[in-house]
Image (tube, helix red, strand yellow):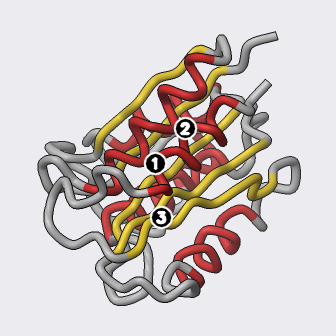
Amino acid sequence: MSKKVLVISSSLRPNSNSNALADAFAEGAASAGNEVEKISLRGKNIGFCRGCLACQKLGHCVINDDAPEITEKMLHADVLVFATPIYYYEMSGQLKTLLDRANALFPSDYAFRDIYLLASATEDEPDTDERAIHGLEGWIACYEKCRLAGTVFAGGVTEPGAIAGHPALETARAMGAAIA
């Protein structure tokens, strides 16, 4: 049975390394027969959460920008995949802002169960993505029916496209292909 996989790439840079990881994961998931949609936050208008909690009653955010459409897609996806560059050992601000804006999902009957994090960074130490993982786990902890199903990290990639040939691309592709 195929799953609905939503891949969200949060890099704002053209030809970004984290976006390449997102593409590889999406290719793998599609090759396994899953329905895959990829959204880039590049060019999207996503404002900060105001903390008004109106979304908890309405089921959607009252801010008129691109976030409600994305969170609606998140609601119906079986699998969520977040791709981010690592800035100062943490996920990108645009991804964190989207996660904050997904507050409308909290009281909902969301479909997602498995969540993946794909990250790239200039730094090449094995624990470079640790804080980004921890930050995402904090969001996941609010959704009792889901789990962090896997992570992929590509370190040592600075310039756009530097990830070409990096083993993390195949790891992301294989992880996507394993979704069944």
Residue behind mark 2: 173
Q: CA distance from mark 1 to mark 2?
A: 6 Å
- Nearest the camera: 92 or 162? 162
Q: CA distance from mark 2 to mark 3?
A: 39 Å
Instruction: Measuring from the top left, give residue 12's x and y in whole percent.
Output: 18, 55
In the image, taking residue 99 as reference, residue 33 lies left or right, namely: right
Instruction: Measuring from the top left, give residue 45's x and y in whole percent.
Output: 20, 47
**In the image, what residue occupies the spot 49% across and 85% down?**
128
In the image, taking residue 54 as reference, residue 176 lies left or right, namely: right
- Nearest the camera: 128 or 59? 128
**In the image, what residue occupies the spot 39% across and 57% down?**
166
Find numbered disc 3 in the image and state the secondary structure of the residue it sits on. loop
Residue behind mark 3: 52
Amino acid type, callout 1: Leu
Residue behind mark 1: 169
**Mark 2–mark 3 contact, CB under 8 Å?**
no
